[in-house]
Image: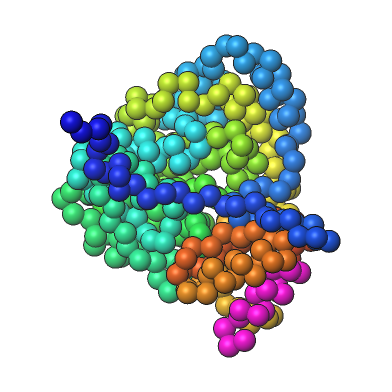
Amino acid sequence: MTTPQPRPNVLAIPAYVAGKPPVARPGLTSYKLSSNENPFPPLPGVLEAATEAAAQMNRYPDMGSTALYAALGEAMGVPVEDLAAATGSVGLIYQLVNAFCEPGDEVVYAWRSFEAYPIAVTAGGAASVQVPVTSDGRHDLDAMAAAVTERTKVVIVCTPNNPTGPAVSQSELDAFIAKIPTHVVVVVDEAYLEFVRMDDAIDGIATYRRHDNVVLTRTFSKAYGLAGFRVGYAVAPAPLAAALRAVSLPFGVSHVAQAAAIASLAAQDELLARVDELVVRRDVLVGRLREVGWELPDAQGNFVWFPLGDRALDFAAACGEVGISVRPFAGDGVRVSIGETEAFDRVVEVAARFAPGA
């Protein structure tokens, strides 16, 4: 007799490596810069809304996310039929593969990019087609378009790209979409859209309105600071959004998460002020890193990327020695989140020792 065996693709799923907390160091305040978390406390009114919602924990959440969809639809000027909620934008990636891919179908995306992509694709029985990013961490959109075959069902554009940082421009995205067959779903993953400061930035809502095959994925985890509540949403033409809702986990987005997200949408002025502050911190850190010899990829998210190659783990260890946790990708590079400014001196000091030519 044999024991039960999972499907072969389940055994092939790569492990997700989460950002680790810092190790306490005597005499030092430790900082976690490994998970792209928002360092600010909840926005005004959010904690109160979440606390009130928690008092109803004996009840199931609204499976239709009715109030959340209404708030999102009003905020973006889109029909509620064009929305689908999930447990973070990562949940939407799982749903996209489940909804649109047969076993063996292909999903094309840049690499290195969001670590959950190969996990979701493999879990769904589809096949990853990873197209290397350019030397400066950008999507090679021409190569991605060329990688599309008759087996391709989904292509993903992560902009800004996590973990490398650069964002795709609107003209670049338009040219790319024009090359993709209309039966292929084009996912524009905008988890960090609020942090983008560049000419010709993508207008995701305008883009989805022009195409029947474009899906935007967004999250409340980053700019809104709700990483612990796991709520994201897709904006897509109604048939695509309906497919995402059809394969969603029943009651997946909790009542507390929905209430916190709605309250966050009502605090836009404070949100934008905090995002602006993080962008200022990002630019200051990038400027200081350039002064010590680094030429980094264009940072358009709430993080910076060090293309360290084989020195990635050594850099992360050196940061750990001074009470800073960062996110290494072995053999590739290190991502450092924009957090408390008090951590910058130590990050810069370590970076100076690892700068090219140092």
| Main SS, magenta residues | helix
* Residue at the (61%, 37%) spot, across then down: 228
Residue 157 shows in the view = yes
x and y, in percent, of residue 172 in the image: 40, 61
Question: Is 147 a magenta residue?
Answer: no
Q: Quick check: 232 left or right of 346? A: left
For residue 332, above or below residue 17: below
* Residue at the (25%, 31%) spot, across then down: 4
Residue 337 shows in the view = no
* Residue at the (18%, 54%) spot, across then down: 149
For residue 158, above or below residue 239: below
Residue 279 occupies which quadrant of the picture?
bottom right
For residue 61, above or below residue 143: above
For residue 35, above or below residue 249: below
x and y, in percent, of residue 41 in the image: 74, 41
Depth order, front residue of 2/325: 2
Specify the farthest residue to the bottom.
Answer: 357
Question: Is 355 a magenta residue?
Answer: yes
Q: Quick check: 313 left or right of 114? A: right
Residue 24 occupies which quadrant of the picture?
bottom right
Specify the farthest residue to the left.
Answer: 150
Q: Write the start and end of the magenta stretch as one range.
A: 345-358
Number of marks present in the image shown: 0
x and y, in percent, of residue 178 in the image: 29, 54
